[in-house]
Amino acid sequence: MPDPAAPNTLPQYLESMLSLLLIQTSLLLTPLSGGTSNASSSEPLDGVTAQEEAKPGHTWSGTADVAITDVSGNSESSNAAVNLGLRWEGELDAVGLGVHYAGVRTTDKLTGDASTTTRLYQYDLDYNRFFSTEKNLYGYLNGAMRQDEPNGLQQRTSGGLGGGYRFHIYEGGDLNLEGGASYVSENKIGTVNETSAVGRAAFNFVGPWTEHLQFTATGEYLSGTTIESYVQDLGLTWTFSDNWRLTLSQSIAWDGNPSPGFSTTDRRWNLLIGTSF
């Protein structure tokens, strides 16, 4: 796979990610054995699957995931990640809310000094309006705020609108493709604040792999005059008991114009335990 950190490799990288998604989707099209999946959804960024319909008789559904790791001995560090999400979906409307945190703090054994190498905060909100009860074509409004100061991003806020289409690939498996425009304000370390209208393209896939395994994939690409970014999240969730699950997630954040002294690409792996309600 091309290295997203290398210059001018974004198109090749997106092509590779799309190819990976299509291969995974083809595998998921194989008829499932063992009945209909009851696996809970998992999305590392927004904490709740945007495509999962609310259970009959329930207005709101939600998810909560947490991971905490402490390392001591030759090296000392503490890692933590938290995802909280709420989702409401009616006959033609859907609303999603998400709150997310991920942090790594490392202590130098020689000096005793502690430093935070990763501290990510993200908040997001989306509203979808479907144009039919089949829930295929829809319009959307969204907003988000992201902070990752140790990696050069002091704050990025965005709001946008556009349209999307939901493909009901099979029972429980949905692929959403979206396109539209967003207005972004971005403040990075050592640079002036940038504001720009940008184009937006995004995808979201969720579907059961087996009765107890579920795969999710999301990606968002923003491109304007001075702002260019791509964020991708992959998750594999194992539901081991009623409403309890383990999720292995991998996230990539690519910045086409990083602050001086910072690299273009950040990566995170998390193993989280969570529940749905």
Image (tube, rainbow, N blue to C red):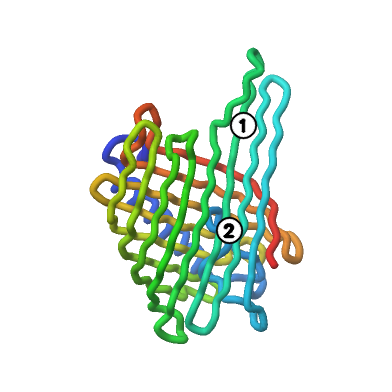
Q: Position of residue 113 (x, y in %)?
A: 62, 20
Q: Position of residue 116 (x, y in %)?
A: 57, 31
- Tell me the quarter of the picture where residue 180 sits: bottom left
Q: Nearer the viewer, residue 27 or 77?
A: 77
Q: Residue 252 vs residue 62: left or right? A: left
Q: Nearer the viewer, residue 100 or 275?
A: 100
**Name of the residue lying farthest toward the left:** 225
Q: Circle 1 sits on which residue?
A: 105
Q: Position of residue 262 (x, y in %)?
A: 40, 31
Q: Amino acid at mark 2?
A: Gly
Q: Position of residue 260 (x, y in %)?
A: 35, 29
Tell me which residue sits at (71%, 34%) in the image: 70
* SS class, disc 2: loop
Q: Nearer the viewer, residue 253 or 269?
A: 253
Q: Earlier in the sequence, mark 1 or mark 2?
A: 2
* Residue 23 seen in render: no
Up/down of 149 relative to 57, above or below: above
- Please give the label number shown on residue 47: 2
Q: Residue 202 vs residue 115: left or right? A: left
Label 1 environment density (alpha carbons within 10 Å; few <14, some 14–19, many ≥20)? some
Spatial distance from mark 1 to mark 2, Cα to Cα? Answer: 23 Å
Q: Residue 99 vs residue 252: left or right? A: right
Q: Amino acid at mark 1?
A: Arg
